Each structure stands twice: as structure tokens, then as C-alpha cells.
Image: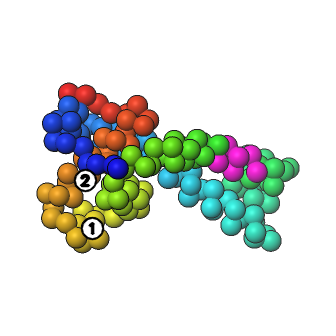
Amino acid sequence: MAELLKQKDVDLFDYDKTRDNLNNFFVKYLDYKSKQEIIRKRTKCSLAFDNLGIYSGGVSDPTGDKVEQIIKMQQYTDAIDEIINLYIDELTKQEKICLKRYIFEKCSNEDLEVYMSLTHKSVLNVKKSCYIKVAKWFDLEVYK
């Protein structure tokens, strides 16, 4: 069963730099996830702006350009999703909540505290453990 990292294990890492590395890494991932959905919705529009060549690389094949964009983004996000799915069971229930709500959905510290019904200090321990574990999956951890 998954457990939070012990404080002595957390202390091996520079939490602030590790957190920043992971947040920066997930910016592209979350952006690509969002763009995939935007492109899919655009393809359903009968008169898309792509007909004018505004969003795509060329006027000649807007549908092909959309498909290429989605494939490129999906390959990137699928690779990350595969790693997350491979290791997700290493996270506690609280760390999974932290990953989803705090890291991916960008909820506030206060919202996370209320959602998990924990004190600020307890949530901070969960966040540190979560960030370090997930950063290690992608070789983004920073040791002291």
C-alpha cells in the first residue's frame, strides 16, 4: 500500500526546485491536452476559421493540418499519460487528489485543504510527497 514519503526522505530533495521543474514540465502537457480539445471542437464547426488559413499552416488542407496537430499533441500527452498510469498506484489517495486537483486543475491551497479536510501543515506534507514522487517518474527531481 502506498505511503507518504517520510520527512527524512523529503529532506533529501530541494522541494522548491523540484516543484518548479514539475510545474514547468506539466505546462506543455496541460496546454496540449487543452489544444487537442479545441481542435476537435473546431473540426465540428461547419465554417471553421481554418478555411482562411488562420490557425493552420496552410490554406490548402485545413483538415490535414488539424489531424497532424492532434496526432503530434496526442503522441506527447499519451506518452506522459502512460508513465502516470504506470506509477499512479505508488501515490496515496491524498497524493492522487493533490496531483489531479492541485497540479493539473490548479486549485488553491485553501481549496485543497478544504477538499481533503486537512490542516495546512498536513496538506503541505502531502504536496511535498506528491511532487517528489511524480517528479522522480520523469527524472525532474532535484537533490540538495
Q: Are marks 2 and 1 in contact (CB under 8 Å)?
A: yes
Q: Residue furthest right?
A: 60
Q: Is residue 78 visible?
A: yes
Q: Secondary structure at mark 2?
A: helix
Q: Residue at x 76, y 51 (%)?
A: 67
Q: Nearer the viewer, residue 37 or 138?
A: 138
Tell me the tag on residue 126.
2
Inspect the magenta stretch and tell me whether residue 37 lies in it: no
**Residue 144 in picture, x, y percent from top left:** 20, 27
Q: CA distance from mark 2 to mark 1?
A: 10 Å
Number of other residues with Cα within 10 Å of mark 1, as a class: few under 14, some 14 to 19, many 20 or more: some
Residue numbers of the magenta segment = 67-74
**Residue 120 in picture, x, y percent from top left:** 15, 61
Q: Nearer the viewer, residue 143 or 36?
A: 143
Between discs 2 and 1, the one toward the N terminus = 1
Q: Nearer the viewer, residue 29 or 61?
A: 29
Q: Nearer the viewer, residue 8 or 73?
A: 8
Q: Secondary structure at mark 1?
A: helix
Q: Residue at x 41, y 59 (%)?
A: 100
Tell me the tag on residue 61.
none
Q: Residue furthest top?
A: 144
Q: Residue at x 38, y 56 (%)?
A: 96
Inspect the magenta stretch and tell me whether residue 73 lies in it: yes
Asked which quadrant contains residue 34, the reply is bottom right
**Residue 109 in picture, x, y percent from top left:** 24, 62
Is 133 left, or right, of 69 in this rendering? Answer: left
Q: Which residue is mark 1?
A: 116
